[in-house]
Amino acid sequence: MKKKLSIIGLLFILVFSMAACNSKSSSGDSKKGNEKTKLDIFSWWTGAGEEDGLKALIALFQEKYPDIPIENAAVAGGAGTNAKAVLASRMQGNDPPATFQVHGGAELNDGWVAAGKMEPLNDLYDEQGWNDKFPKELIDMVSKDGKIYSVPVDIHRGNVLWYNKKVFTDNGVEPPATFDEFFKVADQLKSKGVTPLALGDKEPWTATMLFEDILLGVLGPDDYGKLWTGELAFDDAKVKESAEIFKKMLGYINEDHSSRNWQDASQLVSNGEAAMNVMGDWAKGYFVNDLKLKVNEDFGYITTPGTDGYFMIITDTFGLPKGVKNPDDVKKFLGLLGSVEGQDVFNPLKGSIPARVDADPSKYDQYGKDTIEDFKTAKLAPSLAHGSAAPEGFVTKVNQAINIFVTQKDVDQFIGSLKQASAELK
């Protein structure tokens, strides 16, 4: 009898244990089912000041919304080459990130918006009171058919010539404001054994930036803009003139340009091996944050030849992809991106200036203050190299043509390639 009771007792304990386990398992599944979807912030910000700025932005978001899990889903690769390929795969597979970095202009509007992959954000702009906090021209860059599709977090300037202050002082030369002055300075430096112009075109977009700045200097912003609408042909005499100037400039670059990226080219300027470099102002973030150089002491800046009063604009923006599981949380992140606080945390580290017109200039160094002032009055021109001026198909073909031109320096062939590529603009 005792033996029988013991068996019954053991069975009871076993059944109770199994029930408890099932209860825990059920509770765990329930808890798992209630877990918030992670906000994966997709970008290509992995180097120089850009990574510092993104981390500061994410930290600020975590401070304000500690209950929302967030992930830095950045993919390395200059100008987003690798990231854009990964993004395309995810978007086509109906697995969009919570939000992703995209340049305002054609890259956004002719790409993801035209493909029906983005939700409009007019309600967010109204709710946040943003319609008069961003310049109208900037809102137009992130809008299509009257609907706004992304939030600009920064403004970068593409037409900047950076120079080593000591090299210029030691060689008795002044920063060149015109093409004639550039070639005069370049000849003087070359005669002293200094590489006049650093280029790192391991990825061809850097050389495309140099060419677009030459185009802007020769054409001016109005005719420059007509190239992308088909009102000005690529075999126009001024485009040919620009190509000839580009060819001449390439005679002053470092021999190892094709094995270097933009940071490597900037480093040549920082250590005095080269005197000048044309690059967007993320280079300033690299100089200051990574190389620990001082603005207007170790390096100086001037607009690229012929572009005083013009602003080659590149703006990084983030929107709301269709089909995300946590749109309300995404809008909280976008709200932070578009806020004064968010922009003033991010941009001083990135090297850019705020997209908002009411940000605090005191938080920026002298370069930032100067650029904020310039942005208020300068004539804007969208960057070709960074997808703002023209569709991706055209940009890809231009990059290929530039890559060949840097090696072969055949102006007629180059103009022919540009004209052929312009079929992508229709």
Image (spheres, grey):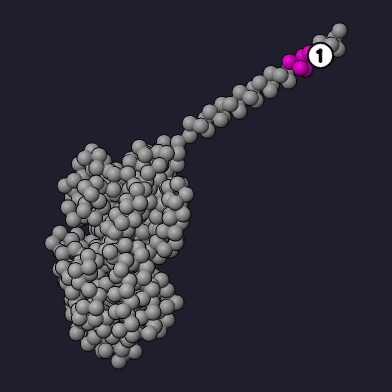
Residue 65 versus residue 117 in the image, above or below = above
Which quadrant would residue 382 be assigned to in this image? bottom left
Task: Tell me where residue 206 appears, x and y as whole percent.
Answer: 35, 72
* Magenta highlight range: 8-12
Our reading of the magenta stretch's main secondary structure is helix
Which quadrant would residue 393 be assigned to in this image? bottom left
Front residue of this view, candidates 268 and 217: 217
Which quadrant would residue 334 be assigned to in this image? top left
Residue at position x 24%, y 86% in the image: 183
- Relative side of 274 to 375, left or right: right
Q: Is residue 263 visible?
A: yes
- Relative side of 103 to 202, left or right: left
Residue at position x 33%, y 40% in the image: 332
Residue highlighted by disc 1 = 6
Does dot 1 land on a helix, a strand or a loop? helix
Q: Is residue 11 magenta?
A: yes
Front residue of this view, candidates 366 and 18: 18
Residue at position x 31%, y 56% in the image: 110
Residue at position x 40%, y 38% in the image: 326
Locate the C terminus and report the quarter of the image it occupies.
bottom left
Q: Label 1 amino acid? A: Ser
Residue 43 versus residue 246 in the image, above or below = above
Locate the N terminus and report the quarter of the image it occupies.
top right
